[in-house]
Image (tube, rainbow, N blue to C red):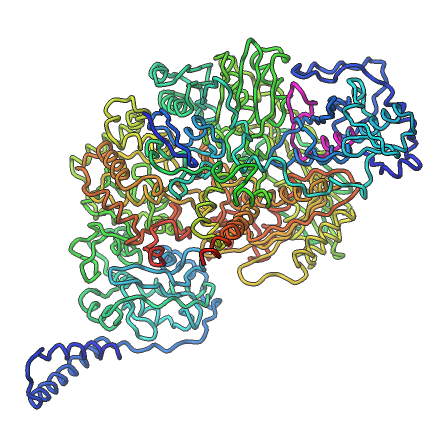
Amino acid sequence: MGGGTAIWANAGSALIPKGEEVDPVRFIRFLAVVLILILIVAAGLFAIAWRGEIEPVAAVDPSSFNEDLVAQGAQLAAVGNCIACHTVPGQPAFAGGLAIPTPFGTIYSTNITPDPESGIGNWSEEAFQRAMREGVDRQGRYLYPAFPYDHFTLVTDEDNRALYAFLMTREPVRSTPPQNDLPFPFNMRMILAGWNLLFLDKGPFQPDTAQSEEWNRGAYLAEGLGHCGACHTPRNRFGAVDSDRHFAGGEAEGWQAYAINATSPAPIPWDADSLAFYLRNGWHEWHGVSRGPMAEVTGNLGLLPDRDIAAIATYVASVMGEPDQTRRERAEQLKAEISQGQTAVQAAPATDTQAGDAQHPGAAIYASACAGCHNGSKPLPFGGLRFSLSTAVNAPNPQNIVNVVLFGLPPSDGEASAVMPAFANVLDDQQMADLLAYMRERYSEAPAWEDVADLVARTRSGQYKVAVRPADGIERGPENVGASGGAEDAED
Amino acid sequence: MAISLNVNGETHEIDVDPATPLLYVLRNDLELNAAKFGCGLGQCGACTVVVDGEAVLSCVTPVSLMEGREITTVEGLGTIEEPGPLQAAFMEMQAAQCGYCIPGMMMSAHVLLRKNAEPSDREIRDALMTNLCRCGTHMRILAAIRRAGELMQQASAPTERRAG
Amino acid sequence: MTIIPKDEFNTQGRNGITRRRVLVGTGALIVSFAIAPHVSAQPQPAPPAAAPEPPQLPGSLNDARRLDSWIRIDAEGEITVFTGKVELGQGIKTALRQVAAEELEVEPGEINLVTADTGRTPDEGFTAGSQSMQNSGTAIRNAAAQVREILITEAARRWNVPRETLRAEAKSIVAQDGRTIGYGELVTDQLLAVEAQPESLLKSPDKLRVMGQSLPRVDIPGKVTGGVAYVQDLRLEGMLHARVVRPPSPSAQLQEVDTAAVEQMPGVVSVIRDGSFLAVVAEGEFQAISAMRALQQAARWTEQPVLPDQNNLQAFLEATKGDIGTVAEEGSPEVTGKIFEATFRRPYQIHGSIGPSCAVAHMDNGQLTVWSHTQGVYPDQEAIAEMLGMDIAQVRVIHMEGSGCYGHNGADDAAADAALIASAVPGRPIRVQWMREDEHAWEPFGPAMLTKIRAGVGDDGRITGWNYELWSNLHSSRPGGAGNLLAARHRAQAFAVPAPRFNISQSGNGDRNANPLYVFPNRRVLWHYVPETPLRVSALRALGAYANVFSIESTMDELALLAGTDPVEFRLRHLEDPRARAVVERAAEEFGWSSGAPKGDRGRGFAFARYKNHAAYLAVALELELERETGRTRVSRAVAAIDSGEAVNPDGIRNQTQGGIIQATSWTLFEQVTFDNTRVTSTDWSSYPILRFPSAPDSVEVHVIDSPGQPFLGTGEAAQGPTPAAIGNAFRQLTGVRLYDLPFTRERVKQAIGV
């Protein structure tokens, strides 16, 4: 609580008018009143905010958990994508320590292996339940909402029990993550009490009786453990999801998380079937392969039974709603083109002799660097997507196509996965802009992007980290594939 | 179109369709053998060359963008009579079986060692992530790159002493 | 072959063969060259029917019996050695020079080596089956020793001194009084134009200077400095670039293609269509690629769903109506005691050369020359001549290195493509480079296999009996026969695929290494031959030994568990061959087997085999890491011991064996061809991943056990069988679960270990 005192002390000093003569007696009296008021407010807040420690427990015997419960927990952990944030690529699973950049500073994920000292080995199930529901650790400290407890709060006690069983039967790893790197006042965990007051809508999930059982199951998984909205819903300046703009598109690890509501920019609108296929397989012939942070999501969902995948797809599709007439017609046109292979033929500007294209500075780049895969005959997921189908090329913000062209899709070591070379060392900012302008012009009906060269420069600079993962999901790709977050500059 | 290419310190004027990937220009127009065609898809690294100090996959690199840039291939690292440190290290460690992937490996290693002559094992492996070897020469390639780092440091050591 | 140490031979002779007989033998001079340069193989005249059976000569000498087929020395003393074998990255050019230099008493650098060329070199069939040293190395060593002795005899005749007083040294014959005479002065056209003898005066192991040394490979300096090293690097005057548009599936037929637009593309010289064979020739390479892409889009094919269910290859293999061959039978097929019973499966896998196949062909005034990285220039010459209806004498096939092949990849097919296109566009050399997708989808695969084992161990801890059955295609569809060339199959006048001949041979094929080397009383080993080949298959490094040794050595570990014995101890208990025991003991010792299993998520496994049961002995012990949450595994450390007989270049043996272990690790952990009911879907490194650097081991140690004076034993494929078994055994030791299906994908691992 030393931190809390500091806040108020600071506030007090601000009350002293600068450069004025002050009557000492009046001032002392004034101070006393302020102090009393502060103490009252602090005590009140403290009463609301204080969460006590839950007693540590002795080492839990992994064999004491029911196997089915553990298996169920494994599936739930996959939905929650726990491993992605709680694992450093190439390091032991769930041992934490992954740097999670936020607008407020860098947070390091915790060790959630059952190691009693550095992990959660001495957590009781009650402590675990509370962390999931309220965002408070066993010792009673507030957790940062980088841990999406504002979503996990919806998880049922039964499912938390299974998750607990799963985590407590993992290999314990002795590993203490680095200290969070947060400036004042964000390093004050107490402020999270206020955040919770404003933004935490405590669960568990309440079904909508007007909807089907499948829809409700999907909503439970997508809104709760799946925490889709953590990335796909925009956040306000307090870093909380803006519930008025549910699924309207957000960002994650340097990527645009596309809108997955009625404003979805996908050229062919998603439906429950295509979503289910995509979530199951990590790609869809009309939409391409998942990459960036989404690759981990689809990689993990492979563990889920079909009915849960279908439920999530049903729910998300219902949020997206039926596409309007224009989008439907455009989609039919695109589908017809693919089935006739027309996109390919007309889109293969193989040489500079083909009229029109030669004028565009991006055309030769495209023909040389892109056409080989993206206009070839190889089907997805290993062939390149036709860009007329690409959400990245049709999206309002070019960040994702910039990321993919700069950093590529690194190969997954030993697993079949889409691979794309990185062009960061080939194309300068203007050449990238030329190429993307050409692609936008040729493969999208949307207006041209603006300031692409600038975005490329910023993305390349490492100002913000871009997570680059292979398309197979939970591969622990080399960390240095994406923008490094300026680490190299820092050393100079 | 006419392009002026700077390869291994020499300038070449060539006339080529701008859509041509760099690899074919290096191999056919400039008759340089080291960069190899392996997949044409940017998946295997056999065609790796160095452009302005960074590794690029020449099979998907448009030659039209190479004007004014500094291109280095394995031929630029030394000759059979006077091999550069990387070449000497690969010979010394006998780090080849069929050898087809090796020039690409050397180019990736060249970029790494220029930045860091004492890379960790993990750093070397990461740098070679996009380079495939089918003969299973991996252990020797790793050893040769470590050895090349030593040779480069030895070569630069006297200079440093003078500077100090 | 028989080794007669030189010193021993000098003192008393051996096997009743005296020095005098050798000298008499060399007296029979035959006037003429065995093979004149640039005149390709006339069929060897058959010996007169009444002639006695010619004596068996060592190695490939038996097939090309004249010394000057192998070694020629010109008037300047330049020595040229000819081999019908080819460099595949195995280092054979270096090892053969060492062998020749050793016996000729010269330096390896003084040997010019000519590898397979139908215009120049002996016909040694294919460079395959780890036989280069066994066949060609043996032939060249014996030929070199005999040439040396002939030169000594000739010098003795000229100086009129006893030949015992002379010795060979530094390209000369030296007399006791210090007189010397160079090889070039001694040699005449006729001197070496003689038939080789069955016995040679080989240098004794303790006198060797060059053999047994880890000489640097002669080809590496060029390869790391940008020299012309591969057929891919061949640039001939006026050369054109061609690409072939392969059908989208094995069953596809070209229905229609409008070539008019493509013919108008820049640089395009010709579009060639012959049945389902479709190709384009252009001035520039990228122009050829662009035209190929356009042709791909323009072509319409009909396809049939003829491929088996990838997820149930067992059903496909078991449904065969093929013959059943008995590989081994001894005692009773009954198995008693504690029984282990299992079924193992192996998928189709590819060679996956990093450089896709390539060839250059030039039709010049009715003479066709083909440069190819084929493993067999003579068989290829014959097949290409048949495909084109040409006289065999009008076709010359010259070997040039390609990217490592590991068996029968697309090399011959690319050669046929180039030949067919060159015959359609004569006058200029044609270079055909396969695309990555061509290689992945069209090279002949290593066949899928199924094996079933039932074996028992008695109360005495010894194996009671062994019942083993395997289901497999033949692992060879190499040309001879034009029908084994893709281009010939796809032409309008299609050549039928030659029917393979099923038989049980000593070297084995699908049944290679199916019969364990272990000693026990009862065994039966059967091969259910699968003649149906919906997917094209042929020789992939080690053939059936990969799946057979995997099955056998997995079983050995299970039996050891049933017997309550350490797996190394259990193997030794059943091995009598001292060299087999030596590699097992050495690998275990160097690995530190006696210190117990590693800690944490690491297991250890062991395996042994003698390749083909008559080539190199190899044992490997390794550590396997497991990441339970992802199912990812990695071999972290491997230690192997190998006995390849007399080691000509120990570092070459180490390099080959390290490579074999790593490649087999990649096969075992990651690799399988994928296909739907019509098309092959694994067509690049995305869809057919192989081991990348992060999965490479921390260390791979290879200990070469030299066996001086022993015959050369095939080495290149020896690690392929033991490696998967050692990995499976390590996984079993770590998790208690056995994996029966190759490859051990993450998904299978996770399924096996649960959560």
Please tell me which residue is depicted at 33% across the width and 75% down the height of the picture. Answer: A139
Name the foreground residue: C552 vs C343: C552
Could you say which is closer to the camera, residue C129 or residue A430? A430
C514 vs C237, left or right, is right
Q: Is residue C651 left or right of residue A99?
A: right
Magenta run includes residue C126:
yes
Residue C192 appears at what percent x and percent y? 79, 22
Residue C69, picture quadrant: top right
Q: Dividing the picture into quarters, in which one does residue C185 lie?
A: top right
On the rendered image, what quadrant is the N terminus of chain C found in? Answer: top right
Does residue A308 show up? no
Question: In the rendered view, would you say B117 is above or below C317?
Answer: below
Q: Most extreme residue toward the top, as rendered?
A: C365
User: Which region of the structure is painted magenta?
Assistant: C115-143
Give how far across and how far down residue A395 sits, in percent.
22, 42
Residue C648 forms part of the magenta stretch: no
Q: Is residue A30 above or below residue C675?
A: below
Using the rendered image of the protein, determine whether residue C197 is visible from the camera's viewpoint.
yes
Q: Is residue C385 above or below residue C99?
A: above
Residue C417 screen position, x and y as percent: 51, 20
Front in this rendered view, residue A74 or C591: C591
Residue C375: x and y in percent read: 61, 28
Residue A41 located left or right of residue C664: left
The mark tally for this picture is: 0
Q: Could you say which quadrant of the image residue C649 lies in?
A: top right
Most extreme residue toward the front is: B162
